[in-house]
Image (cartoon, rainbow, N blue to C red):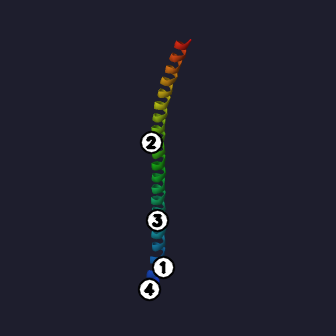
Amino acid sequence: MSEHIYLLTIGLPLATVLLIFGMRYLAAMKQARIRYDNEESYRELAEKAVATQAETAAALADLKARVASIEKVLKEVE
């Protein structure tokens, strides 16, 4: 058996195994990056929801104050 064929029969399976593990590593990295981006978008959405809720609470408090003043005026008119 020639030396080139011997090295080829040992090197190709090893290279195949290394290539498979490398591809699995890259796929895992890509999934982790996608998962992180997805979590980051959920985090931004939650922050926007909290800000909107605070604005709504402030608007509701303002509305309650206005209704109270209108009720007061109506009671004085009666």
Tag 4: amino acid: His
Whichever of callouts 3 and 1 sits on the residue coming sooner in the sequence is 1
* Disc 1: which residue: 9
Q: Residues within 10 Å of mark 4 (few under 14, many from 20)?
A: few
Q: Residues within 10 Å of mark 2 (few under 14, many from 20)?
A: few
Q: Residues within 10 Å of mark 3 (few under 14, many from 20)?
A: few
Disc 4 element? helix
Mark 3 or 1: in front is 3
Q: Are marks 3 and 1 in contact (CB under 8 Å)?
A: no
Disc 2 element? helix
Could you tell me how far apart the alpha carbons at marks 2 and 1 are, in whole angstroms?
58 Å
Is 5 in front, or is 34? 34
* Disc 3: which residue: 21
Tag 2: amino acid: Glu
Whichever of callouts 4 and 1 sits on the residue coming sooner in the sequence is 4
Whichever of callouts 3 and 4 sits on the residue coming sooner in the sequence is 4
Tag 3: amino acid: Phe
* Disc 2: which residue: 47
Q: Residue at x 45, y 34 (%)?
A: 54
Q: Are marks 2 and 3 in contact (CB under 8 Å)?
A: no
Disc 1 element? helix
Could you tell me how far apart the alpha carbons at marks 3 and 4 are, in whole angstroms?
25 Å
Could you tell me how far apart the alpha carbons at marks 4 and 1 are, in whole angstroms?
9 Å
* Disc 4: which residue: 4
